[in-house]
Amino acid sequence: MPDGAEGGVGGVSFRPQMKRRAVVAGGGVGGLLAARVLAEHFGTVTVIERDCCPVGRNPRAGAPQGRHVHVLLPSGVEALESLFPGCIAELVRDGAKRFDYGQSRIHTYGTWLPRVGTGLMALAQTRPFLEQHLHRWAGQVPNIEVIYGASVRAPFLDGSRSRAAGVEFSTGNSACVKRLEADLVVDATGRNTRLLRWLDESGFGRVAESRMGIDLGYATGRFRVAREYLPESALLYVVGPPPSQTKVGVIFQAEDGVVLAGLGGYHGDYPPADFAGFLQFARSLSQPDIINVLARGELCSCIERFRIPAPVRHRYRKVRNFPERLLPIGDSVCSLDPAFGQGMTLAAQEAKILARCLEEHPKLERSFTEEYFRRTDNVVDVAWGVSSRENLRYPQTMGVRPWYLPIATRYMNLVMHAGDPQVAAEVYRVISLTASSKTVLRPSVAARAMTAALKNGLRRMLHSFRKTWGNTDVT
């Protein structure tokens, strides 16, 4: 593209600085969203992806969890729309299911959350469906190029050894290593990123991490279900309640009339991969809603299994003299408990953070890296807090238990069982990563929750009294 040229996709104009190149390692959701952001600030953005260009709706080999349940939470929907204007309407037109997250059917903390209109719009679709669209949209951006069938070996540093100067990569099965110079390198290679080892071997030290030992195993099947047996909402979710119940189940309606059913279990309570065993596992959930759907459905795929021993959060911010112009994104920063459906949304939020940091620090000075990590830590705090607080309700979970955990658990029990629509709306904002967990601590929310708890307690007491004395003459 010549100097001063402008290209566009989805109504967005691009005015890149021509002499700068950015390289993104990894062409999954996080990598493609990062590339879209970088395209506005760099003359050339090169995405290096190990897999071939996606064709059809089959998951990439590099995304084994791609056969499983994926929902884009409301904050992720908002971020995606801001990066590719008009994309949500196109996804819905092609079959994705857009729904008010507050209208989901969610059973957690031993109770059904009230269904309320929140305006928090989520999106249900399979991951290959979303990635196929992202690859097409990225391909329409004039200064984004994708090298498929190539693997990034490692970044390399400039002469001062204080900043990244590009990446080393190889194509196919070739042993020949090539170098590609860049002004910024983004690592989007996921939970198995080589960045951690490279930092240690390059003298920057080991990256501190937080780990939550959940030993989760889950299985997913695709079903065809007659319309009259479909759940009321696009998303039906049943978890626990801990600590007595370790099972989780989810159903969502995706494109092409497919219903995806995911069953999981913590701490070794894994679902089987045979159909009869899969249904039996669904039957053992704390609520019958999921088996009521599956028992009337037709399995139209093999049941796929996946395991995640522990979500891991990498604390890059604690690395002394972390190299400039090198940033991780998505699962390279934090791999979460997939049962909470936070991963793609968190990657989208981090892409928005990258955009803000590039606007505020166009020279890519050290403050650019520091600000990116600070803001990324803030959004990861929310997602990590939501999932880990629930994970730690199991005594078997291995992880740091903060001193306030018993108090927080009791308070969340109060909030979840309040049955108050306004309280529920705030809960939906938190679990959809639209607001901080502090939202449910506001005095107005706490007051409504406690008032509802008192009313519920009084109602139960009167019911018990009537049951005991209703048919007895009192003289």
Image (tube, grey):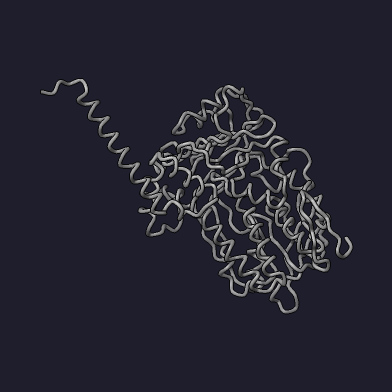
Residue at left offset 41%, top offset 43%: 416
Residue 365 visible in image = yes
Q: Is residue 392 above or below residue 221?
A: below
In screen coordinates, is 149 left or right of 283? Answer: right
Name the image quarter holding the N terminus.
Answer: bottom right
* Residue lying at the far left of the rendered structure: 475
In the image, residue 64 above or below residue 372: above
Instruction: Tell me where residue 68 appears, x and y as whole percent.
Output: 62, 40
Residue 295: x and y in percent read 55, 24
User: Going 79% across and 60% down the picture, which residue do you hit?
Assistant: 45
Numbered marks: total: 0
Residue 191 visible somewhere in the drawing: no
Q: Is residue 354 above or below residue 203?
A: above
- Percent position of residue 427, x then y: 47, 46
Q: Is residue 454 left or right of residue 62?
A: left
Residue drawn at the location 55% of the way across and 65% of the way down: 208
